Image (cartoon, rainbow, N blue to C red):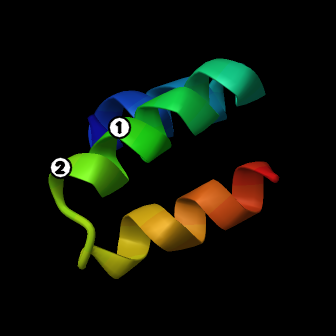
Amino acid sequence: MLLDGNRLFAEHRWTAAMMKYEEAIQAQPTLAETHYNLGMVL
């Protein structure tokens, strides 16, 4: 999910990337990179 979010982010698909990052946070809430990337989308 994190990698999917990163790909979507690179494609400037912000809403879709945000959704993938939120899914990744639900799966692994302690992964700091995902929280950081979500912040970059916002």
The answer to whether 8 appears left or right of 1 in the picture is right
Element at badge 1?
Answer: helix
Q: Nearer the viewer, residue 7 or 15?
A: 15
From the viewer's perspective, is residue 28 above or below residue 20?
below
Question: Residue 20 in the image: x percent, y percent?
Answer: 43, 31
Residue denoted by label 2: 27
Tell me which residue sits at (69%, 65%) in the image.
Answer: 39
- Marks 2 and 1, Cα distance to the nearest angstrom? 6 Å
Question: Residue 12 in the image: x percent, y percent?
Answer: 76, 25
Residue 13 is drawn in which quadrant? top right
Q: Nearer the viewer, residue 20 or 7?
A: 20
Residue that lies at the very extreme toward the front in this rendered image = 26
Question: Residue 34 in the image: x percent, y percent?
Answer: 41, 62
Q: Nearer the viewer, residue 38 or 8?
A: 38
Tell me which residue sits at (37%, 80%) in the image.
Answer: 32
Contact? badges 2 and 1 (CB < 8 Å): yes
Looking at the rendered structure, the kind of residue marked 2 is Ala
Residue denoted by label 1: 23
Mark 1 is surrounded, within 10 Å at the Cα level, by few (under 14), some (14 to 19) or many (20 or more) other residues, namely some
From the viewer's perspective, is residue 2 above or below residue 33?
above
